Image (spheres, rainbow, N blue to C red):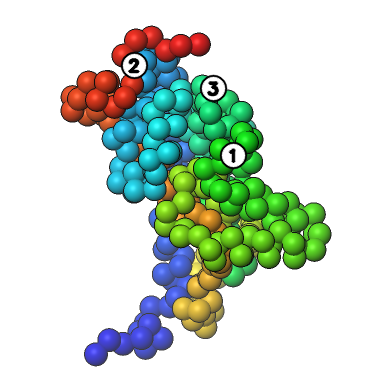
Amino acid sequence: MTASLEETAVSYKELADLEDNFSEIEKGIIRQHYLRSKPLYSKRAELVAKIPNFWPLVFKQAPMDIDEYIQPSDSALLLHSLRSLSVTRFELDEDEQKGDPRSVAIRFEFAENEHFEDKVLEKKFWWRQSKDGFAGLVSEPVEIAWKKSKDLTNGLLSLVKAVYNEQQTKVARNVALTALKKKIEGTDISGVSFFAWFGYVGKHVSAEESKRVIEEEEERRRRAADEEAAGNGDEDNNTAEDYAYAQDEDLEIFPGGDAIAMVIVNHLWPDAIKYYFTSISEGSLSDFGLDSGEDEN
């Protein structure tokens, strides 16, 4: 029979504090790795820019976690129009010491194509914490300038952006919100375009709330450390529910968009050369419907 944590000598606070310590170590590792590897990634960018179809071939071997979301129409667009992909930890670029290394920006660069006008699509993910215990990545919708009748998301991305804009301006959301709910109800979300990923939002946590929660948590840890040193640690009465959080995904057109971002950041981006070599070893460029000649400008 399993005993509840309340029946043991270990408190939820002790476990939570231990997790915080692990998190701080992980942040330090990410920070140092990013700063030390930046010159290497810059060098790689220079080299692969000279290789025709490098990034399309990388995506051809994308991990299953990404590939399962790429529809045939997405694949054609990526294979023929994707020119570059890059990942940055933009908060570190702004402030190496105070920036959160877990915030990331994923930038796609495209050639002229039949679906949209944009040459660059960049999606940012901010690491945020909320007062209900949530800690993770949040984002905001990225608008895509679709050409007439070429919207791969069938209007979903535009509706998400409209709802998000209304939320930000505190305007009554009924019109766009109702339209989005109706659209989602009539859509098989599992079969939407990969480009719906640009509409992922996640939990609504403002920068102000996150900053306040982090400061309060740091102050709590300082007090706890002082009390422990003085031998006056207070008894912890928190329960598992105090550390739980709930995330409403009813309005997400690409649930799990943060997980896809992490696959790109942790696998596709750092292992791009490996995926490229796998592609060219498994077949010629013509096998993928790609021109083996130089890129056209």
Residue 141 drawn at (x, y percent): 62, 47
- Above or below: residue 263 compared with residue 172: above
Residue that extends furthest to the front in the rendered view of this protein: 149
Q: Residue at x 45, y 44 (%)?
A: 194
Tell me the crowding category of disc 3: few under 14, some 14 to 19, or many 20 or more residues within 10 angstroms, Cα based: few
Does residue 2 sit above or below 124 in this rendering?
below
**Discs 1/3, front:** 1
Q: Quadrant of residue 103?
A: top right
| Numbered disc 1: secondary structure | loop
Q: Which part of the image, by quadrant, shows the N terminus?
A: bottom left
Residue for badge 1? 149
Residue 263 seen: no
Is disc 1 in contact with disc 2, using a CB cutoff of under 8 Å?
no
Image position of 296 with respect to 144: above or below: above
The answer for how far apart the CA atoms under marks 1 and 3 are is 16 Å
Closer to us: 210 or 20: 210
Mark 1 or mark 3, earlier in chain? 3
Residue 112 image label:
3
Instruction: Tell me the distance, in whole angstroms, between the alpha carbons under discs 2 and 3.
Output: 16 Å
Q: Amino acid at mark 1?
A: Ser
Along the line of sight, the residue nearer the viewer: 220 or 170: 170
Marks 1, 2: nearer the viewer: 1
- Residue with the mark numbered 2: 291
Q: Could you tell me which secondary element the residue under label 2 belongs to? A: loop
